[in-house]
Amino acid sequence: MQDNNDHTVTTVNNHVSEEEEPTQQDSLKEDKKFERKLLVVPDWKDLSFSEILQQPTTNAIKGGGIRKQVTEQGQGLLPTIGSKIKYLYAGYVIPSDDQDECKVPPVLYDDGYSLQQVRLFKRNKLPFFEKCLFSMKQGEKSWFRIGADCCLIDRSSLMALPNEHLQELPEDYQVSLLYYFEMVSLERKRPEPTHLDERIQYAQDDRILGNNHYKQQKYKEAASCYGRAKMLLDSAKNVPSSEYPRLLEEQIKVHLNMIKTCLALFEQLKEANNIKDASKELEKALVYCNYHPLQTHEPSIPELFYLRAKILYCKMDYERARDFMDKSISLGYINDRSKTLKSYIDKKISFEKSKSDRNTKKTMSQMFDSEQEGLYSDAKPYDMVEEWERMQREDERLGRKVWFTNTGEEFYESIQRPNFEDVTHQE
């Protein structure tokens, strides 16, 4: 750790490296859980650690327990179990036998390297992580001093770190850590709704939040919000018949938005040449189109026919896409988007038809050419004059003459010639 007031820490295998800017392709990977972000660690000097989170478990350990020093106050409420948080952190070993005062700079021990995203449960890798994170609000930045009774790290695990001060520690040294946390975002888990009005209100809040993400082209975040709204609405039980229309209306809105988000993700992934994941989004969109409430009320939802047509257009099934598009227009869904998609579908069908005709002509031509080459491979070029003279010679040899009927039929009349070989000689 450096002595300047503000510096950037990013490490891989305990070696300081320069942070790279995220690329568009990295941000589109579905399996990417972390976002790259710079962690600026403030100066570690003059920390008082006035707030005590956990008392020492024994008086024999000097500087035990967990103590906290806030460098920047956060806003809002503290997280609860199940809350979704994003945070940055860096952990340091205090290479001094004096646990109350840092005589030498702390040694970097553990670096989050990128923005961590987790749900808070009692299951993180280090016991003191929960204590620290549960005590922070959104936007808060704090230092924590972890005593030897809480960090549960022994001296032998530190010997691999390349630092001369650690190598000089006595055998009975009890490890004490210094951790810095930044709570980047905090999404508290809501209590389970107890009645239908509260459930629908929660779903509306998630849908509106998803709409905001969609407008900002954050389609994955939008899909997550719509997914939570869907779970809330689908889990409604014993709904009175008088309240069902309200529930159905919100379900239709959520599912239409989920289909649109899948189509937007398809376009985004396709531009990034991620064809495999883009195809998955199309299949998900088709599944959402077949959702039971949508199918039951499909004739009264003209926009659903338009979305089906758009999905089939993306799947290059243009004939079926035209059928759904015509149905959507017949039900009154007419706007600039529907007109544009209709023109695209018609052009694709016209192009595919002309392409098919050209391919058919080419195939037939190749077929006849190959047939002629097989049957008449040794034939001479056709000469009409030579053919006519050959036919005349053949007629004379066979003793016939050609005549034609009114209908154009061709007949041959034999020329009667005496056969001198059969006449008996008379004397």
Image: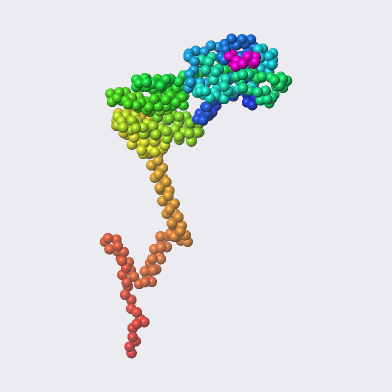
Question: Which image quadrant is residue 423 in?
Answer: bottom left
Of residues 122 and 255, the one nearer the viewer is 122
Which quadrant of the figure has residue 333? Answer: top left
Q: Is residue 40 visible?
A: no
Please name whichever residue, 327 or 200, is drawn nearer the observer in this view of the structure. Answer: 200
For image coordinates 35% across by 72% down, the residue present is: 399
What stretch of residues is rendered in magenta?
Answer: 55-68
Colour treatment of the image: rainbow
Whether residue 60 appears in magenta in the rendering, the answer is yes
**Number of marks drawn:** 0
Q: Position of residue 403 (x, y in %)?
A: 30, 65
Q: 309 or 99: which is nearer to us?
A: 99
Q: Nearer the viewer, residue 55 or 15?
A: 55
Which residue is located at x 63 percent, y 14 percent?
59
Q: Is residue 5 above or below residue 346?
A: above
Q: Is residue 219 left or right of residue 91?
A: left
Image position of 344 with respect to 386: above or below: above
Q: Is residue 150 above or below residue 404?
A: above
Q: Residue at x 40, y 27 (%)?
A: 231
For the point 36% across and 34% down, the residue is: 290
Residue 195 seen by the camera: yes
Residue 332 lies in magenta, yes or no?
Answer: no
Residue 158 appears at what percent x and percent y?
A: 67, 24
Q: Image quadrant for the N terminus?
A: top right
> Residue 116 in the image: x percent, y percent?
54, 23
